[in-house]
Image: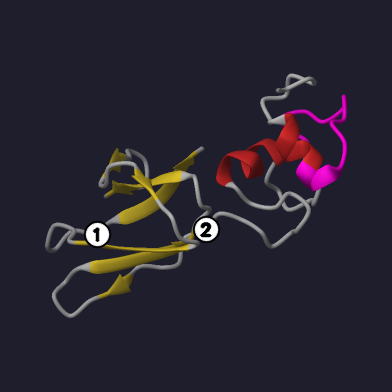
Amino acid sequence: PDANTNGISDLWELHYFGVVSPTRTRTTDTDGDGVSDYDEFIAGTDPTVRNSALSMAAPSPQPNGALTLNWASSVGRQYRILGSTNALTWTPVTAWIRLADTNSVITLAPPPGSAMFFKLEVSP
């Protein structure tokens, strides 16, 4: 259910705030961390804790040229990694992955000799 039509599950709002507020919108940022409550709902992070955020650690180079990426994940969410050589045009480098753990690690073999940027995408 979503009584206040903000795109956030009423059950989730009740869990974190104890009430479904008619003034909570998709842009409300309860903990003031720059991430809206709606985005925290999608990411599976805690909207009442400033340092609860979806983030990926810097890639860790491996001896074989591969890169290991890790991030704190939320059970039940699915993730995919997007890559870019110019940080303007992004393409998926993994399929959607549904994880059953809160610490996610993936190793990628980017094309040799090319600089790559990575970003993490999440979906409920």
The kind of secondary structure element at disc 1 is loop
Q: In terms of image quadrants, where is residue 61? A: bottom left
The kind of secondary structure element at disc 2 is loop
Q: Which residue is mark 2?
A: 55
Q: In terms of image quadrants, where is residue 89? A: top left
Of 91 and 86, nearer the camera is 91
Of 11 and 40, nearer the camera is 11
Q: Is residue 102 left or right of residue 4?
A: left
Q: Amino acid at mark 2?
A: Ser
Q: Which residue is mark 1?
A: 115
Tag count in the figure? Answer: 2
Whether the residues at callouts 1 and 2 have beta carbons within 8 Å, the answer is: no
Of 70 and 89, nearer the camera is 70
Q: Which residues are magenta?
A: 15-28
Q: Is residue 17 magenta?
A: yes
Q: Is residue 14 magenta?
A: no
Q: Which residue is at a point 72% across and 24% down the rendered structure image? A: 6
Which sits earlier in the primary sequence, circle 1 or circle 2?
2
